[in-house]
Amino acid sequence: MAEIEHFVKPDMKQHPRFSNIAHRKARLFPADNQVGDGRVVTDLTFGDAVATGVIDNETLAYFIARVEMFLQRVGIDAERLRFRQHLPTEMAHYATDCWDAEIQTSYGYVQHTNKVHACRDEGVGAQTCAEFCFAGVAGNLYPTVHSTRGVHGGVSFPRPN
């Protein structure tokens, strides 16, 4: 359906609307839990996740929350939705943190939204970005929007009024 990239200065990773989502609880599957006890964290707010370093920064947490709200709005059951953090071996060389939305199906958890990540590489503009590539909604597949500027470039759309 769409790909969105949002860039901020690397030393200013706060988001002006973070307080709007900081209280929301997230279903997170951090990398440490994947190689540890296998437990999905359900009792952590986005605010606490950022404060404790589970999620890298406010901007990243804000966009994870927005993806979560969108998926729930189109009918995804909140109890079957989780955000899985990439393991260090899965992360792009320029990423400091990366999360995928996964939905539990009869086949187990299936990656749905790829990816919400924070970047650190000077070659990527030394910026933090959140990138979402939606492959389908409620079982309906849609063509993906491909970048016009390389693998992690982006297609720019005007901001609605």
Image (spheres, rainbow, N blue to C red):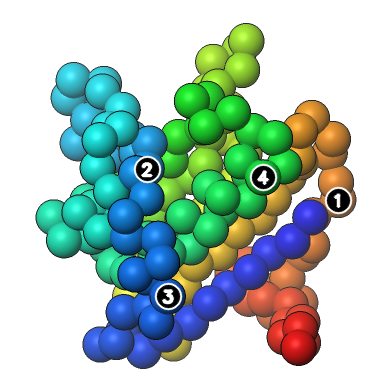
- For label 3, the crowd category at 10 Å Cα-Cα, with few meaning under 14, some 14 to 19 and many 20 or more, is few
Residue at horizontal 17 percent and vertical 24 percent from the top:
36
In the rendered image, which residue does mark 2 sit on?
26
- For label 2, the crowd category at 10 Å Cα-Cα, with few meaning under 14, some 14 to 19 and many 20 or more, is many
Which of 122/25 is in front?
25
Q: Using the image, tell me which numbered label, if any, was put on residue 143.
A: 1
Quadrant in which the C terminus is drawn? bottom right
Which amino acid type corresponds to the residue marked 3 in the rendered image? Arg
Q: Using the image, tell me which numbered label, if any, was put on residue 73.
A: 4
Residue 121 location, x and y as percent? 36, 78
**Circles 3 and 2: CB atoms closer than 8 Å:** no
Picture layout, residue 61 above or below residue 161: above
Does residue 155 show up?
A: yes
Q: Earlier in the sequence, mark 3 or mark 4?
A: 3
Q: Secondary structure at mark 2?
A: strand
Residue at horizontal 28 percent and vertical 48 percent from the top:
45
Which residue is outermost to the left? 52
19 displayed left or right of 111: left
| Quarter of the view holding residue 14 | bottom left
Which amino acid type corresponds to the residue marked 4 in the rendered image? Arg
Q: Earlier in the sequence, mark 3 or mark 2?
A: 3
Q: Give the Cα distance between marks 3 and 4.
A: 19 Å
